[in-house]
Image (tube, rainbow, N blue to C red):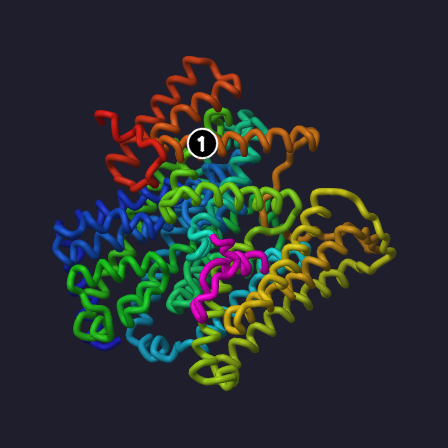
Amino acid sequence: MTPDILQSMSDAAAMLFQWRMMFYLFLGAVIGTLLAVIPGVGGLMGLALLLPFTFSMPATEAIVFMIAALAVMSTADSIPAILFGVPGTPTSMVTVLDGYPMAKNGEAGRAMGAAFTSSVLGGIVGALLLIVVIPISMPVLMGATSPELFGFCILGLAMVGALAGGSMAKGIGAALIGVLLAFIGQDDQTATLRWSFDTLYLWDGLHILIIALGIYALPEIADLAILRKAIAPSGKRSKLSGVGMGFRDTMRNLWPVTRSATASSALGIIPAVGPTVIPWLVYSYTTMVTRGPKMFGRGDVRGVIASESSNNATVGGALLPTVALGVPGSAPMALFLGAMLLHGIAPGPDMLSRNLDLTYTMVWGIVLANVIGGLLALGLARPLSLIVLVRPAILVPVIAVVVFAGALQSTRQWEDGLFLLAIGALGWVMKRARWPRAPLFLAFILGPLVEKYFFISYNIHGWGFLVRPWVMALLGLTALFLAGIVIGRWARKRRQGKRLKSLRFTPSLSLDTVFAATVFAAFVLAFWTSLDWRFAAAIMPQIAAVAGIVFAGAALVGVLTTATWHSHGALEEETHFDLETDFGDLAPRTILLRGAHFLAMLALLGALSWAFGILVALPVFMIAYLLINREKALITLTVTASFWLVAWLLFDKVLRLAWPRPLFDIGSLLPF
């Protein structure tokens, strides 16, 4: 490093350790931690809520305050992901895969200890790597044009193959469902309305928060309501204090932490690959390279470590294109960019030259905020881990209200609640039919980016953009990755001496069969309805629909046939990249009835909120749910009154959330 760079780093550290700066840094870390615990808030909405409070702050203090809040949100959002299987933000969705099963096994403390420790280390490693790459990053950033970003997106979609688990057809079919969901709304190229069904709400498409909470949060809450058992059995209470064990797990896996954080920080620099995608890529790679016994997807602490060290490291990587080019590296960074402009700080190459000390102040702020946030989260881990012992009759309605309230903040329209229920039902059926949900979410993010960068590249370069050196390299890497998956599966079968013995046609009217047939029909209908669209609007949806017909058809054939295999020993079980719930001896009819009851109660919450407002609907819903589930009247009233008071103070007075206007605004008549 040159003396000028070292001097800038020193000046930045001296600036940050002034008492005023440290106060705002600590305040941002504390508030960010508290906001991240609320499902649906996360980085984007959290920064939006905090931005007005920075107007009266000096510019540098405001930037440090915002960057500290954003940095710790990637740590604390693992708390609801582990305890309830509800991702605090989309970035913590991958943590659910192993963190929630650990909580159900009585290891919530261990999972949170590992998550917080690896988050802190990942954030520090990512920020320190950023310090090293800042001087050499400008040429790389300037060279990443639309064709290269297209190549990165294609590589990201290829990772779906690694997330498919035991059934490649189901995994890729789920990804193609996500692509079609992402194409709903007005097409950017031709302004064609794609599958909007004459609904104004769908003109802008489905919001990512609706997909995240619907596809992951609601199915886990529904399963908890159906089982009617605490998340962790009371007999496993002694394991809930394993925070120290999680810390030791992370220390034993320092190399995977460093590897994950380094790769995530580097990928985070590329605007096309955001923090909602990178942890999935790191997790899938970790499952492939990890040796020895594996429990990924069923409660493997190494899965928690990989995902959490990854999502924190992306914050530093996403910061670099934001400040150096004015190109947000992630959605929250877009809001952070707005905060910089509001405070008179212009992003651009000067941030890596004349204002390098300010850039390094942000980087050091990320390092210190991660340490503060990690310590705060570790302090909360032990008491919060006891939540897994709370009766579901009390826990389910509380989480459901928080998730519903978070979903209403996506576009602040009542349709948010309706589509939350629809996507939640889809997620629950996918989970029961063993269709992995991770590919759907990953493709929902990357599908529109592939279409966007394809048309930008094609309009500028024609088909010649495909033969640009970096594009060819990325596409070649994609082909090698997919070939590696196929070869790896073939090699595994060969090691086991696995060969097909017989294949029988065994039709049955099961949930798996009905769902596969429904998905197949949906892809056919999607292709048929797109035939009247203009070429630019139709080409990508039609490619996705045709591919979906192929893979959904293959999945349907797989469901309707039974294969018998020869093997030298016990068959090695394929990793299923999704949560699974064991309903024990519950009859299918009981499961469906309880699931329908939970859906009806959520519909009641939505209807009452639409009619009278959520703060009026909340106590009615809580009392009805608790009494129907045979809670005592005193407990019902105490829980309802306590939760309503907390919700009113938090949502209405502290966060000042804006709600859709109800049909009868009774809440406005109240004196408080």
* Quarter of the figure with the N terminus: bottom left
Q: Does residue 291 appear left or right of residue 342 in this picture? A: right
Q: Is residue 262 left or right of residue 21?
A: right
318 falls in the magenta region: no
- Judge whether 90 appears above or below 222 on screen: below
Residue at 68% of width from left, 56% of height from top?
A: 520
Q: Which residue is mark 1?
A: 605
Mark 1 nearby-residue class (10 Å; few <14, some 14–19, many ≥20):
many
Looking at the image, which is closer to me, 461 or 350? 461
Quarter-of-image position of residue 619? top left
Question: What amino acid type is highlighted by mark number 1?
Answer: Leu
Q: Residue at x 18, y 70 (%)?
A: 355
- The verdict on residue 185 being magenta is yes
Q: Quadrant of residue 549?
A: bottom right
Residue 111 seen by the camera: no
Give how far across and how far down residue 199 sits, in percent: 46, 52
Residue 462 placement (x, y as % from top left):
48, 84
Question: Viewer-proximal residue, 301 or 214?
Answer: 214
Q: Which residues are magenta?
A: 176-198
The C terminus appears in which quarter of the rendering?
A: top left
Viewer-side residue, 5 vs 88: 88
Label tally? 1
Q: Is residue 368 left or right of residue 222?
A: left
The residue located at (80%, 60%) in the rendering is: 497
Residue 342 in the image: above or below residue 304: below
Q: Where is residue 100 shown, x and y percent of the image? A: 52, 41
